[in-house]
């Protein structure tokens, strides 16, 4: 790509401007100082699509790390994980630190061996296959590029390591490396070294390197955590695009729920080695199976209250907030999504107003309630309905489909309908 166009831009806003530049030129096949930018490159990727779509079956997968001391307990990093990941989909593996996300990826890639259970790629049992024979592409949080090699050499590296018949010819290697680079839109940077790239560009080199062997499964372990917020957003959209173009079954690990929800076909929510829920992002958000999933998904977080059901009425403290069809219970946890509150003069839930935060289109009304478990209650209200006063009491009615009941002990969701 033309240095006189790109270099000044690179110094300013390297990644984003290159994206907008290439995207804006996408309408025509163009020559940019020796590099042909061909919008038709996706056609070649369709070949990848046919070859690579591969379901991944996890069958009662368990990984136990033995304790180092006699008195210590073993860690069960992954506990009886059974799921069939449909081919060609992007799966977000989501959960708090230490819940077993990386261990799950390492088991799929072959870097770890399961204590129990089996792994299949398509119909092939790969449980005891060494990593190099599984056909997986791996991208880690720290891109681990070779600093002394150029971008092209970094991408070529996995191909050059192939032995015997699997090793492509020199021309073929070069063609495949260039194709992978084009796919992630770094084909204009092939001669640079990693230190001369932005974080987002380095991340793309790592993805190109993982794609160059045409993997059956692409595994991404927190690939965006080293990037700033803006670059994160753009790179995750890029990952989505690349995944769609290649159709490669992809597992994307993150502890950022928003990131997982925005790009995944399905999300898997894990905690303490257990899978808690699997489903489409919107379904998991709308129908969380328990308190953990409900609190883990959504920003601002779901608001929690102590409540009870008495004579068919749901109470939060003294406030009878909804008529419900479930049996009486002395104690339960009520969760209300921030968008589940509607300001209403005589609304049943009476809160003490603390602040109104302006967020542009919406306002965040911050309040407290004696029965609230959450320190403050955050409700999202359209700006035109926002309260004019900044203190005193504020009353809400609740949207029943944004209100959830959970067992106060186990955290399991209690189904109900509002009457
Ligand atoms: N080699 C090991 N030996 C012993 N325990 C391990 C080993 N690897 C991981 N663990 C433990 O297994 C559990 C799951 O670890 P894992 O790395 O899979 O978590 P994670 O979900 O990827 O967390 P993070 O978001 O912090 O990366 C943790 O309790 C961790 O301490
Ligand atoms: Mg991890």
Image (cartoon, helix red, strand yellow):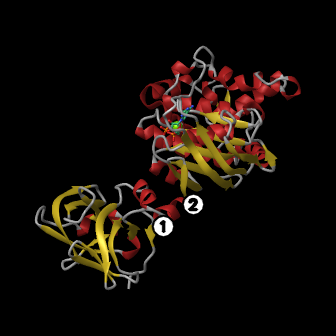
Residue at 35 percent across and 60 percent down: it is 302
* Residue 160: % across, % down: 76, 21
Dot 2, how many residues are within 10 Å of its Cα: few (below 14), some (14-19), or many (20+)?
A: some
Which element is circle 1 on? loop
Left/right placement of residue 174 relative to residue 60 reads right
Residue at 56 percent across and 60 percent down: it is 280
Q: Looking at the rendering, in which quadrant would you find the C terminus?
A: bottom left
Question: Number of labelled discs?
Answer: 2
* Residue 329: % across, % down: 35, 76
N-terminal label among 1 and 2: 2
Identify whether 231 is placed above or below 194: below
Q: Which mark is residue 13?
A: none
Q: Looking at the rendering, in which quadrant would you find the N terminus?
A: top right
Farthest-out residue, right:
165
- Answer yes or no: do the residues labelled 1 and 2 have beta carbons within 8 Å? yes
- Viewer-proximal residue among 52 and 318: 318
Q: Quadrant of residue 204?
A: top right
Q: Can residue 269 be seen here?
A: yes
* Residue 82: % across, % down: 65, 54
Left/right placement of residue 45 relative to residue 377 reads right
Q: Which mark is residue 287?
A: 1
Q: Which residue is mark 2?
A: 279
* Residue 17: % across, % down: 49, 35
Farthest-out residue, top:
148
Which element is circle 2 on? strand
Farthest-out residue, front:
71
Q: CA distance from mark 1 to mark 2?
A: 10 Å
Left/right placement of residue 389 relative to residue 152 reads left
Residue at 75 percent across and 32 percent down: it is 130
Residue at 48 percent across and 27 percent down: it is 10
């Amino acid at each position: 790509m033309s240095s006189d166009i790109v270099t000044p831009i690179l110094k300013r806003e390297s990644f984003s401007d290159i994206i907008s530049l290439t995207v804006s030129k996408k309408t025509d096949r163009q020559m940019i100082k020796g590099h042909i930018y061909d919008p038709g490159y996706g056609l070649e990727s369709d070949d990848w699509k046919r070859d690579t779509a591969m379901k991944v079956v996890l069958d009662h997968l368990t990984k136990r790390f033995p304790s180092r001391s006699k008195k210590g307990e073993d860690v069960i990093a992954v506990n009886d994980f059974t799921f069939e990941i449909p081919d060609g989909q992007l799966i977000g593996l989501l959960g708090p630190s230490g819940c077993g996300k990386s261990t799950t990826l390492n088991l799929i890639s072959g870097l770890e061996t399961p204590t129990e259970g089996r792994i299949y790629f398509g119909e092939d049992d790969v449980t005891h296959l060494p990593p190099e024979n599984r056909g997986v592409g791996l991208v880690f949080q720290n891109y681990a590029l070779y600093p002394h090699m150029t971008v092209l050499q970094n991408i070529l590296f996995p191909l050059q390591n192939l032995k015997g018949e699997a090793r492509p010819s020199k021309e073929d290697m070069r063609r495949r490396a260039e194709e992978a680079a084009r796919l992630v839109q770094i084909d204009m940077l092939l001669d640079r070294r990693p230190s001369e790239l932005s974080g987002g560009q380095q991340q793309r080199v790592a993805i190109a390197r993982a794609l160059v062997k045409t993997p059956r499964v692409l595994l991404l372990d927190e690939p965006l955590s080293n990037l700033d917020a803006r670059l994160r957003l753009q790179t995750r959209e890029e990952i989505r695009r690349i995944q769609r173009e290649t159709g490669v079954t992809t597992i994307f690990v993150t502890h950022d729920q928003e990131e997982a929800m925005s790009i995944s076909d399905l999300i898997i929510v894990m905690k303490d080695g257990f899978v808690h829920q699997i489903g489409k992002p919107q379904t998991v958000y709308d129908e969380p199976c328990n308190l953990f999933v409900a609190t883990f998904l959504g920003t601002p977080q779901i608001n929690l209250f102590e409540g009870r059901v008495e004579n068919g009425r749901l109470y939060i403290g003294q406030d009878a907030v909804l008529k419900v069809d479930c049996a009486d219970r002395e104690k339960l946890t009520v969760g209300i999504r921030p968008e589940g509150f509607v300001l209403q003069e005589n609304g049943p839930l009476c809160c003490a107003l603390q602040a109104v935060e302006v967020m542009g289109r919406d306002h965040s009304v911050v309040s407290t309630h004696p029965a609230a478990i959450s320190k403050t209650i955050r409700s999202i209200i359209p700006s035109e309905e926002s309260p004019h006063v900044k203190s005193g009491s504020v009353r809400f009615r609740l949207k029943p489909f944004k209100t959830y009941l959970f067992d106060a002990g186990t955290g399991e969701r209690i189904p109900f309908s509002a009457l």
